[in-house]
Amino acid sequence: MKLGLAICALWAVGFVATGFAQVAAPTPAGSSEGSAAGNSADTSAQDRTATLTLGTSIVLVPALVTTKNGEPVFTLTADDFGLWDDGVQQKLRLEDDADKQPVALVIVVEAGGEGATHLDDYAAIGPMIDQLVGSVEHTIAVVGFDSEAALVQPFTGDLNKAEQAVYGIGPGDGKAAIVDALGFSVDLLKKQPPKYRRMIVTLTETHDHGSHLKVVDAVREVSDTNTAIYSFAFSSTKADAKEEASGFSSREPGPEHGCFSREWTGDPTRQPSVASQDYDCLAMLAPPLRLARIALIAATGALKKNVPETVAHLTGGEYYSFSNRKSLEKGLQELANHIPNRYMLSFHPLNPHPGFHSVVLQLKDRPNLKVAARTSYWVEGAQ
């Protein structure tokens, strides 16, 4: 890690895109089937969603409902929503008092690449940290990154320490490994007690430069069902965007003798696992899996074009662009207003197949309102 640190005492760290939404969205059903059976879970949903596997059965869907003027709406019930998981309508619950649950927040700061020119702008987040976490119990960590990610401030309940950690980050090297930094931050949050609502706030450019994590693995990392990512990003230069587009992708051919064939003729170092290959083949045959596969392809494509925007929409967070400290402050203020007015919906998947799931949340008979929510989650067991 090559980050410069001004304070030596610090430790050295809705919808993806229109096309994705169109691919993933089912035709809304006119009936009320799939409405909530109740308004709250028997026990805390957050206590059961550290990592969704085939042995667990609840998915959290944070949602923001706004008017056309952008004002939050907070008077709806679970019956006002309809949700589809890979095209299959689900029964929804509305988690009571979700905004009163403790918060674990990781602030992710780009110091490498063009991030070095925005270090003074990042200082805008300092005075806003307390508004982002609200008045509930909280713990905050700060991650800084260039070509590598490092923990600058371990989790602390002291807002001043978190603020000073952001101020103490100096310029890094010429890289901006955003995807690796996100994976690093998600892993940090997974180690926190499950009682916490998990949040990531990122201050980065739009394109990744230098990450080692594969695109599909990145989608898998950020699709944790109890983590929302709120992204603030400035535009990468055209030269950087071109470099990223050429380097942050790969094409792997399928078996020559049919989908399920074990006769691999491609790069021997990239031969897919049997389970992964069978999943891809089944996705061509079974409609729900095919829908999930199409959505995954759309998500990975969007990730290459704009990392912070894509991960925000995948996780039910929010995306804001900024160019200077003033525009960043404006976005942070809007986010601080939105967070306590978000709905926390949950459901038990009717078909929890391993791998990527496409989620579509829609409002019933509310044409004048907009909803933004999680668009995916991942069930472990696909490999």
Image: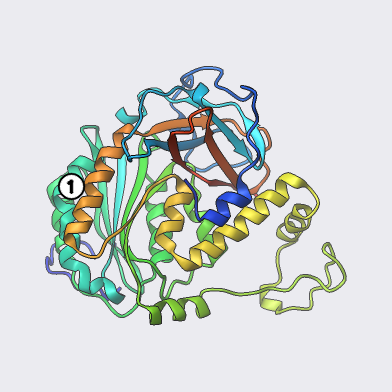
Question: Residue 213, position in %: x, y?
Answer: 49, 67
Q: In this view of the protein, which residue sits in the foreground, 117 or 69? A: 69
State the residue lying farthest toward the top.
38
- The answer to whether residue 199 is left or right of residue 316 is left
Residue 10 visible, this angle: no
Question: Residue 232, position in %: x, y?
Answer: 31, 57
Tell me if mark 1 has few (under 14), some (14-19) or many (20+) residues whose alpha carbon lies within 10 angstroms of its own.
some
Quadrant assignment for the C terminus: bottom right
Q: How is the image coloured?
A: rainbow
Residue 88 visible, this angle: yes
Name the image quarter holding residue 300. Answer: bottom right
Name the image quarter holding residue 92. Answer: top right
Q: In this view of the protein, which residue sits in the foreground, 177 or 336? A: 336
Question: Residue 207, position in %: x, y?
Answer: 41, 70
- The answer to whether residue 36 is left or right of residue 123 is right
Question: Residue 223, position in %: x, y?
Answer: 50, 50
State the residue lying farthest toward the right.
257
The residue at 35%/73% (across/down) is 236
Q: In this view of the protein, which residue sits in the foreground, 193 or 36? A: 36
Quadrant assignment for the N terminus: bottom left
The residue pinned by badge 1 equals 128
Q: Is residue 109 above or below residue 49?
A: below
Q: How many marks?
A: 1
Q: In this view of the protein, which residue sits in the foreground, 269 or 246? A: 246
The residue at 25%/42% (across/down) is 336
The residue at 51%/43% (across/down) is 51
The residue at 74%/61% (across/down) is 277
Q: Is residue 74 above or below residue 258?
A: above
> Which type of secondary structure does the marked residue at label 1 adopt?
helix
